[in-house]
Amino acid sequence: MNPTKVAIAGTLESSDVMVRVRPAEALTIEIKSPVLEQFGEAIRKTVVEVLAERDVTAADIEVVDRGALDCTIRARLETALERALE
C-alpha cells in the first residue's frame, strides 16, 4: 500500500530520527545523518526492509537521523507510514 498523504514521525532530538513520507510515482529514499559514512547502509537496509514488509512501492521517504537505534528507525518509519495511509 502506497501513502496517500504526507506524514511525519519522530523528532530531531539526539538519539532520535525524523521520518517524512510523501506520496510519489516511484520509490525514493533520502537519508541525512552525521554518521552516514559509518551507518548509512544499515539505515537504508532497515528502511528498505520496512517498506518491503508494508508492500510500499511508490513513496518519497526522507530520513533525518540523529543517532537513532535500528528499532527507533523502524518504529518511526512504521508510524509515518500508518499516518500516511489513514
Image (cartoon, rainbow, N blue to C red):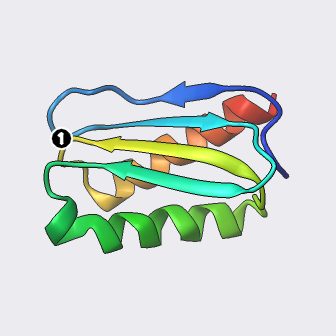
Q: Residue furthest front?
A: 25
25 relative to 18, above or below: below
Q: Quadrant of the rendered structure where residue 46 is? A: bottom left
Residue at 47%, 41% in the rendered image: 76
Residue at 40%, 30% in the rendered image: 10
82 relative to 41, above or below: above
- Please state the total of marks drawn on the protein image: 1
Name the side, left or right, on which 79 lies relative to 44.
right
Q: Quadrant of the rendered structure where residue 45 is? A: bottom left
Relative image position of residue 63 (x, y in whole percent): 41, 45
Callout 1 amino acid? Ser
Relative image position of residue 42 (x, y in whole percent): 33, 72
Name the side, left or right, on which 27 lies relative to 29.
right
**Which residue in the protein does label 1 denote?**
15
Residue at 50%, 61% in the rendered image: 47
35 relative to 13, above or below: below
Relative image position of residue 53 (x, y in whole percent): 69, 67
Name the side, left or right, on which 30 lies relative to 50.
left
Relative image position of residue 71 (x, y in whole percent): 37, 56
